[in-house]
Amino acid sequence: EYGLLQPRREGGEKLYPAGDVDVAVACSKLARVGISARHLRTFRTAADREANLLEQLVAPSLRSRNPERRDAAVQQLQTLAETAQELAQLLFWRDLRQVAGH
């Protein structure tokens, strides 16, 4: 849907991961106010870039044969993701306040 969701096929059926339902709902809400599929791809591209950057930082540890190192990498990835999301939200709201003239 909207070019953002990637189903897997099983027995001729399209199967989507559970989290994709939430993505589809959000896309539908935005589409109802006039945001088209080509605009929704902007969100996908931004999310992909952020995820790829964080992946690069922890990839060597995630590939480690040492289970403790892999576990630490997963924890680090979660912490990095939370911090990156916080930064993205802060920048987003800062920009919207400027648009609104506040």
Image (spheres, rainbow, N blue to C red):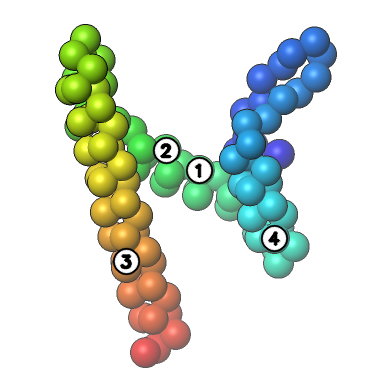
SS state under label 4:
helix
Q: Amino acid at mark 4?
A: Lys
Q: Position of 94 compared to 2: left or right?
A: left
Q: CA distance from mark 4 to mark 2?
A: 21 Å
Q: CA distance from mark 4 to mark 1?
A: 16 Å
Residue beneath disc 3: 91
SS state under label 1:
helix
Crowding at mark 2 (Cα within 10 Å: few <14, some 14-19, many 20+): few
SS state under label 2:
helix
Q: Earlier in the sequence, mark 2 or mark 3?
A: 2
Residue beneath disc 4: 29
Residue beneath disc 1: 44
Q: Amino acid at mark 1?
A: Arg
Q: Amino acid at mark 3?
A: Leu
Crowding at mark 4 (Cα within 10 Å: few <14, some 14-19, many 20+): few
Q: CA distance from mark 2 to mark 3?
A: 18 Å
Q: CA distance from mark 3 to mark 1?
A: 17 Å
Q: Earlier in the sequence, mark 4 or mark 1?
A: 4
Q: Earlier in the sequence, mark 4 or mark 2?
A: 4
Instruction: Check if mark 2's residue and mark 1's residue have beta carbons within 8 Å.
Output: yes
The residue positioned 32% from the left and 68% from the top of the image is 90
> Which quadrant does the C terminus fall into?
bottom left
Q: Position of residue 70 (x, y in %)?
A: 24, 22
Decide: is 88 above or below 38.
below
